[in-house]
Image (cartoon, grey):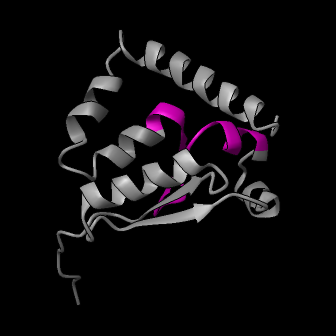
Amino acid sequence: MAKQATNKPEKLTVYFDGACPTCVRDRDNYQKLSGKNNNVCWVDITGADDTLNALGIDPRKALTELHVQDEQGNISSEIDAYRLLMARATLLKPIGWLIGLPVIRPLVSRMYRWWVHRRLTREGRI
């Protein structure tokens, strides 16, 4: 028996820093913008080093870069992770496309890494 086609997107698992108020606020805003049918599961990485290691994700990198896992088990990080996530929300799709452009991507990546490092240093977490 063949499966019926559905419009539900493939499940994504997002590993985010739940100890970061900005990250939690960003998650909440994303959920508001994307609606209920985006099939995204959010996993707080706080204290989850064993889980991350089992997935092949370096816990320190998980703290400094967003990681997303698709249904096939493929893991994307940093800008690629954001692009996958933004593709789920109609209002964010253009931003996801924009940050993937060859000229923009390295600049956004550099700014993102600088901002995260600054935040974690200020919080005494790295």
Instruction: Tell me, yes or no, whether the highlighted magenta stretch contains residue 69.
Output: yes
Nearer-the-camera pick, 105 or 25 = 25
Q: With respect to residue 87, does 72 lie above or below?
A: below
Residue visible at 34% across and 64% down in the picture: 10
Left/right placement of residue 38 relative to residue 62 reads left
Left or right: where 114 falls relative to 40: right
- Residue 108, position as x, y percentages in the image: 45, 20
Query: Can residue 6 be seen from the camera position used here?
Result: yes
Count of numbered circles on the image? 0
Q: Is residue 97 left or right of residue 126?
A: left
| Image height of 38 relative to 67, above or below | below
Q: Position of residue 53 (x, y in %)?
A: 78, 55
Residue at image position (68%, 58%) is 45
Q: Quadrant of the N terminus?
A: bottom left
Of residue 38 and residue 22, the one placed in the foreground of this image is 22
On screen, residue 124 above or below 8? above
Name the quadrant of the C terminus.
top right
Range shown magenta:
60-80
**Residue 14 lies within the magenta run:** no
Quadrant position of residue 46: bottom right
The residue furthest bottom is 1
